[in-house]
Amino acid sequence: MKYLSTRGGAEPRSFSDILLEGLMPDGGLAVPETVPRFMKVKLDALRDLAYPQLAFEIIRLYVDDIPAQDLKALIEKTYTQDVFGTAEITPVTKLEPGFALLGCSNGPTLAFKDIAMQFLGHLFEYVLTKQGRSLNILGATSGDTGSSAEYAMKGRANIRVFMLSPHGRMSPFQQAQMYSLDDPNIFNIAIRGVFDDCQDIVKAVSNDARFKGEYRIGAVNSINWGRIVAQVVYYFKGYFALSSSNDEMIDVVVPSGNFGNIYAGYLAKRMGLPIRRLILATNENDVLHEFFETGCYRPRKSDETHATSSPSMDISKASNFERFIWHVCGGNEENGARKAGDRVASLWRELEHFGGFDLSEDAEWSEVRDSGFLSGASSHSARVYTIKSVFEKFGVVIDPHTADGVSVGRQLREDEVPMLCIETALPAKFEATVKEALGRAPTRPAGYEDIEQLPQSFTVLDADAGEVMDFIRDHVPQ
Ligand SMILES: *Cc1c(COP(=O)(O)O)cnc(C)c1O
């Protein structure tokens, strides 16, 4: 399996080559030259596999430069009951006939990002050890990515993590989770600013090729291909748990931000998984809902980005969306990669110059229409209402992000097709909104009761790339 760039201007690369990089050299994202497809017999054979075996059968198709037995061992080390609380890893909770939640948030930081990030921790360590290298991960987080990355990378000899977070702007639980990590290779940097400032600093540092090379700067952000492939797995797991044969169709609703989670679902569908509709749920930051409704993709400016009660979906642009557009432009068709690359490059130039693009008059729009995507947007009052009604009807407490999904899913649901909603976080992470809905805080999982009481360590810096570079220089041995 080779990986191409969405913008068509880079040499094909192998999995291990793209794993540790952010963008491709031409500024595009890595995409697989083909999306493998399971035949019916193979799909039947996957149905009863346990999570790690299923994960191996799927991930191996995208990773051909790590020996199979090594990859298998890495996957088996990752997906254990010990780390994810159950042997199923992503258990399905049926709320009512035809409607269920896929529990993806039982990893160490209580959000679905652990599913991919825990795998990445093992994978990075393996690849770096093989290459005799070390890596300094620089990231920006509004909450969930940072803690998930830190818990996955802590204690790994050849990896350091420098994580920027907006000072005083995360939920108290999220802050405690990150800042209480006591590990010599983890550096929490609280930036005087907002999440966008953090992200701008990461971009500035990564664009400094010399610094990036000298200090071996790497990324684990949502465009990381290793994360995407690991996320494909739970769509299969969820489908098999909800259906009784591979002749049935289901709809899946996904609370979305950077389009990473639902893009994995799109790959699963292209691989032959009988998903009828992929329903993309946004909160008030509805840039993706707008696209699927109108064909216009119009990323927002920072000051147009709302701070909502489902903060992990507060995005102004959706980084993985470029991959989807590449597929839609025929990137996987025979001899289609060049044309798709040129097309994506020109659309993204348009984006840069005019702040958006409009596909509704173009040939690609019918591809988008045929892709199975539907969308909807939620709001604070819809979240609060949904948390309350799901609890009253089913006795299950959901978090505000999952509530965005359930809220949108309920509107678009059709009786004859079962629906699965991806649960992206546990309610304990977002107490304030749950309290508003239920009049009481959600119960915390064991071990998290007094997390705010633990000592916290972090360094506060100005929103200035130079300061962050100095900090890295001071903490990376040469
Ligand atoms: C990251 C995150 C999302 C958004 O996922 P994307 O892959 O960026 O679309 C939704 N909910 C929660 C709780 C998250 O942490």
Image: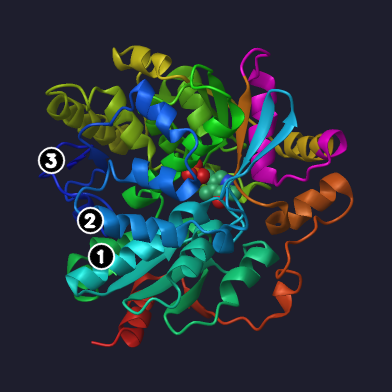
Above/below status of 478 relative to 241: below
Magenta residues (range): 391-417
* Secondary element at tag 2: loop
Report the side of 314 relative to 323 (left or right): right
Q: Position of residue 317 (x, y in %)?
A: 44, 41
Query: Which of these two is toward me, 157 or 262?
Result: 157
Give the mark count: 3
Q: CA distance from mark 2 to mark 3?
A: 26 Å
Name the kind of residue labelled 3 in the image: Gly
Q: Is residue 427 left or right of residue 15?
A: right
Q: Residues within 10 Å of mark 1 (few under 14, many from 20)?
A: some
- Do the residues bearing badges 1 and 3 touch, measured as CB atoms within 8 Å? no
Q: Secondary structure at mark 3?
A: loop
| Most common secondary structure along the magenta stretch | helix
Q: What's the distance in space between the residues labelled 2 and 1, CA to CA?
A: 9 Å
Q: Are marks 2 and 1 in contact (CB under 8 Å)?
A: yes
| Vertical arrangement, residue 238 with respect to residue 463, above or below | above
Q: Earlier in the sequence, mark 1 or mark 3?
A: 3
Residue 9 marker: 3
* Magenta stretch contains residue 404: yes
Q: Amino acid at mark 2?
A: Ile
Disc 1 versus disc 3: nearer the observer = 1
Q: Which residue is mark 2?
A: 66
Q: Which mark is residue 173?
A: none
Above or below: residue 439 compared with residue 446: above
Q: Who's the residue at 70% across and 47% down the image?
A: 399
